Structures are given as structure tokens and as C-alpha cells.
Amino acid sequence: MEHSKKGRARRKNPSDSNVEGKRRATIMKRVHMARKRGERIPVTFDEKGQPEGRHGDELMSWIGVLAREHIPIWIQDWRSRDLDRLKEIIWKETITSFTVDESFRTACIKSCGEAARNFRHDLYKTFVEGFLKEESVWTRPQKVIDNYPNIEEDDWVKFVQYRTSSQFQQLSDRGSEIRTNNKYSSRGGRDGYRKLDQEKFNKIGKWEIRDGLWLEQQMGLDRELKDPACKKASELIMEYNTHESQGTFESVGTNDVLSHALS
């Protein structure tokens, strides 16, 4: 099957895969060096059971590497029991490289599934979505071949077939509708609440409550809330916090200030 060179040249974000490739190579080198020494990278966890610090970041990056290396891009549902063997391989790879407790297993598998989903999304947005009318869309782009040699030609064809199917389009439309109805969007980086919560802990010596973290996520670089809905929610958070301090409102578990302010 021939493809247009012009189509290849128009692939979006050409530097992204290079940056990702370097990051992947760096973390794999660290892990493999530790393995050669017969060591595992030590990871500490915070009071909420989340990996913390530099080694915690390396663990999460490693999970992302495993997602890209082991999970086929044509998989549709990571929750399927048919994938239990693959999940076991990923967990064994993790505990061979890092000192993590069995209690982290569920979070590890979930994070790996999320990383794989994000990877598939990026592949689609970068190499498929804008080129559906081009014959070249059915052939692996050179950057995919160079950076992800584990993705075979058959894998790519299956991936494009599903992503261009009516089944996927229905799921995509449903997701777009949900996002449209969501008034609030997070402004956090790729490590999200995990690193933000730990940064707050390092600064003030205590874990931040949910409404404080939520407000941090909604703020721009200038520390201001731009969205009217977020500003309204911020006012309600302050109001509920006042009621709580006065004893006229009780915050219990997830039935807290944030849940009431956003309801």
C-alpha cells in the first residue's frame, strides 16, 4: 500500500515523540542499571498511599513506559478479564524494579491502563485524526516506527480500524458531551493532584483538604480564577468553610465542603 510523502510531512507535533522517547530511554536506563546491580529503586509513599519524591516520579514514569511497551494499541477495554495475564506481567515488571508493597498493585494496574489510554489518544490526535482522507493513515508513520518499534504494522491497522469505526465514534461523541457538561476543568500538570498535594504538604507541613487542592487546580499561572463557574464555586467554598467553623455545617468524608460547593 503506497502512501503520500506529503501526508507524512504534515504530521502534527513532530518533536513530541522525540521528547517522550528521551524520557522513556532515561527511566529505562536507570531501572536497568539498578537491576544489573541486583537492586530495586526504593519508593516511599505518603500518608495517602501515593508514591512521593523523585523515586515516586520515576515509578510513575516507569508505569507509563510499561503501558506503551506491553499494552497493544488496539485494546478497547483495559478492565477485561482476558487481560489478566498481561496485568500480571506488568505488576511483576514493577516489583522487580521498584520496592513497592502488594497494596500498590491495584493503583499500579489502574495507572498503567490510564497511561495506555492517554497514549492511544495522543497517537490518534497526532497521526490519525487529521489524515483520515489520506491513504497513508493506514501505514505506520516513521516516527512511530522509530520511537515505538513494539508497534507492528498489524497493530497499527487494527488501531486505525477501531478508531475510525462507528462504535468508537459513538463513544467519542458521548465523551465530548460529558466534557461539555463539565463546568470545571483542571489546570494541573501531568502528575495532577498527587504532586500538588505533596508540594502543599512540603510547604505547610500538613495535608491539604480537598477544596483547597481543587482551587489550586483551577488557578492559572497568575493565581487567579478566570472561569465564572469556578469563581462561584470558590465563593460557595468560602461560605461552607465559614459555616463549618461556626459549627453549622459538618464535613464528613466525601460529603465535604467541595462536594456541596460543586453540587
Image (cartoon, rainbow, N blue to C red):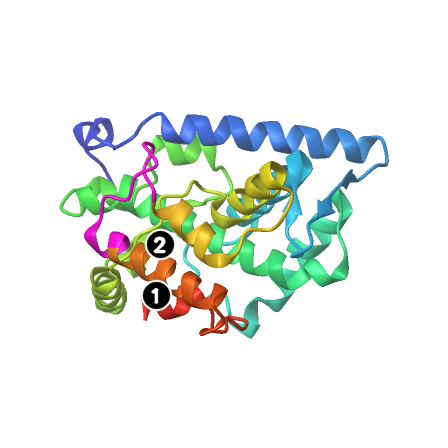
Which residue is situated farthest in the front direction here? 246
The numbered disc on residue 261 is: 1
Q: Is residue 223 magenta?
A: yes
Element under label 1? helix
Residue at 32% in and 55% down: 234
Is residue 76 visible from the viewing direction of this image? Answer: no
Residue at 32% in and 62% down: 236
Residue at 32% in and 71% down: 263
Is residue 151 visible from the viewing direction of this image? Answer: yes
- Relative to 190, residue 11 above or below: above
Label 2: how many Cα within 10 Å (few below 14, some 14–19, many 20+): many
Mark before the other along the chain sequence, 2 or 1: 2
- Relative to 224, residue 162 above or below: below
Pick the front one: 209 or 75: 209
Is 98 displayed left or right of 226 in the figure? right
Pick the front one: 47 or 192: 47
Which residue is situated farthest in the left direction here? 133
Place of residue 193 in the rendered image (x, y in percent of width and height, measured from the top left): 49, 49
Place of residue 215 in the rendered image (x, y in percent of width and height, measured from the top left): 39, 50
Question: Mark 2 or 1, which is nearer the eye?
Answer: 1
Element under label 2? helix
Residue at the spot of label 2: 159
Is 143 displayed left or right of 46 in the figure? left
The span picked out in magenta is 219-231
Give the residue type that dot 1 points to. Ala
Is 47 displayed left or right of 179 in the figure? right
